[in-house]
Image: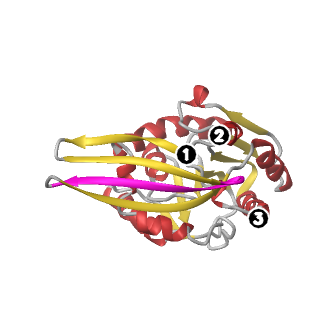
Amino acid sequence: MDTATDTFYDDLADYYHLIFEDWNRSIEKQATIFGPLLEQYANRVAPHVLDCACGIGTQTLGLSMRGHHLVASDLSRASVARAQKEATRRGLKVQFYIADMRNLSPILRDDFDVVLAADNALPHLLLREDRNKALREMARKLRPGGILVATIRDYDRLLEVRPSIQAPSFYGTQSQRRIVHQVWDWAGDEYDVHLYISLETSMQWTVKHYVSRYHALLRNDLNASLREAGFTTVRWLEPSETSFYQPVVIAEK
């Protein structure tokens, strides 16, 4: 993993919700997407879920509100602190841990129905050996027959075009608007994401700039790593099937 990844998310924790037009609405919407998927493929009405890349809680909060049993962890201390505060504010009972995906030993349980790693978390692991280590850790946390659910950008397509920018979005109301956009700086099969959040206050603009590196992880490479980690059936669900903005991969232990 890029050594700056934890710093990226620590710095971003207080502002991460601003990348969404309405974060609370996104929490609810994602729960309506992931909830049925987890219930279907884990074959549980209220599965026990480890969200091992929880960030500020976008998936954790919604799934907990749906009635799933959540344990959540992340490398970023500031993100976990924000997620814990948001869970408390909503009256949700979620256990939180500081843990790297490559070492989930702080979490003692090993009988989860689901391990979740959403929002393109796996490509933060730049080296294959780190990716394989993380996937072995995730497998170790699952009961027999449990599932790993991850979402990832469609790098098979993106590597063909190597886009340099994600178009700006304007959110908010007049005099309290914000602009959110990304610039992607490619270097082989890796790229730096420059995230800009421009905030309008009192007729002036303040720009927040955050940088993190990703590995453009191809599907065949991830499939191979999943099998090496002990997963069997691997399914890819496209955005057209799930209504989620990234492809979803589901792997059974």
Q: Secondary structure at mark 1?
A: loop
Query: Spatial distance from mark 3 to mark 1, Cα to Cα?
Result: 30 Å
Residue numbers of the magenta segment: 187-201
Please determine whether, in this image, residue 146 is positioned above or below residue 169.
below
Q: Was residue 192 drawn as part of the magenta stretch in this picture? A: yes
Position in image of residue 251 (x %, y %):
74, 44
- Where disc 2 sits, the SS reads helix
Residue sitting at x 43%, y 51%? 61
Q: Amino acid at mark 2?
A: Leu
Task: Judge whether 242 appears above or below 110 on screen.
Answer: above
Residue 75 seen by the camera? no
Q: Residue at x 64, y 47 (%)?
A: 150
The 10 Å Cα crowd at callout 1, few under 14, some 14 to 19, many 20 or more, is: few
The residue under the point 79% across, 64% down is: 129
- Label 2 packing within 10 angstroms: few (<14), some (14-19), many (20+): few
In which quadrant of the rendered view does residue 40 lie?
top right
Quarter containing the N terminus: bottom right
Question: Which comes before the other along the chain, label 2 or label 1?
Answer: 2
Q: Residue furthest top?
A: 240
Compared to residue 140, the image places residue 239 above or below, namely above
Q: Residue furthest left?
A: 202
Type of residue at label 1? Ser
For mark 2, what is the residue?
A: 158
Q: Position of residue 180 (x, y in %)?
A: 38, 47
Would you name the residue on which mark 3 appears? Answer: 133
Is 68 left, or right, of 109 in this rendering?
A: left
Question: Which is nearer the N-term, disc 3 or disc 1?
Answer: 3
Please state which of the two labelled residues, at mark 3 or mark 2, is closer to the viewer. 2
Q: Which residue is mark 1?
A: 164
**Seen in the image, is 238 located left or right of residue 223?**
left
